Image (tube, helix red, strand yellow):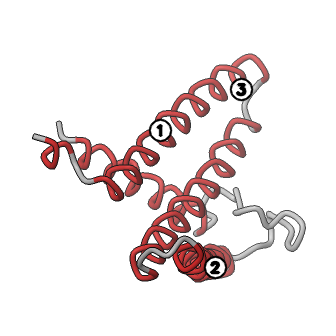
Amino acid sequence: MKAINIILFLLIFNVSVSIVGGMNIYNMGLDVRDEYDINTIESAKGIDHFLGGLAANLVLFGIGGSIIGALVRRSMSESAAYGFFSGLVVTVYTNTYGILTGISSALPTQAAFMVNVVIALFLGISGIMMALAMMQLIRGGIESYM
């Protein structure tokens, strides 16, 4: 299996977990505990919260990437694309982590420990794969060296 297939699967999986969590089907909420009561939040507010946070992070990371590109005298559009991708990954992974830890907190303590270990392994592997994807965006795939 190619690395790009693994990376796309992980990204799509995390996006779908974030969207389902945003729909508030399981009354999990997306880090809205301070603003709303979890039991009274409607699914439309959860989706709006997810999409609003995603849009804000994409804009901020894109602008930050272009500023960094200007400072190091690289192509600003290329740096903005890297920042845009990083914003997508950070937002989706943060939401997924919040949802999965919310699920593990509802379990008994013996089971929650092992679920947290699995969550940590999943997020660690996903983070490493996304870091490899960023390096591959910058340096090119293995075919460029052969």
**Left or right of 37, for residue 47:** left
Q: CA distance from mark 2 to mark 1?
A: 23 Å
| Residue at which label 3 appears | 112
Please rate how many residues cluster around mark 2, counting C-alpha atoms within 10 Å: few if below 14, some from 14 to 19, many from 20.
some
Rendered image: mark on residue 60: 2
* Above-or-below relation of 34 to 4: below
Residue 28 position, x and y percent, is: 70, 56
Task: Decide which of tag 2 and tag 1 comes sooner along the chain.
Answer: 2
- Of badges 3 and 1, the one in the foreground is 1
The quadrant of the picture occupied by the C terminus is top left
Spot the residue most to the top: 110
Q: Which residue is mark 1?
A: 128
- Helix, strand or loop at label 1? It is helix
Q: Relative to the observer, which residue lies in front, 106 or 96?
A: 96
Q: Amino acid at mark 3?
A: Ala
Residue type for callout 2 = Leu
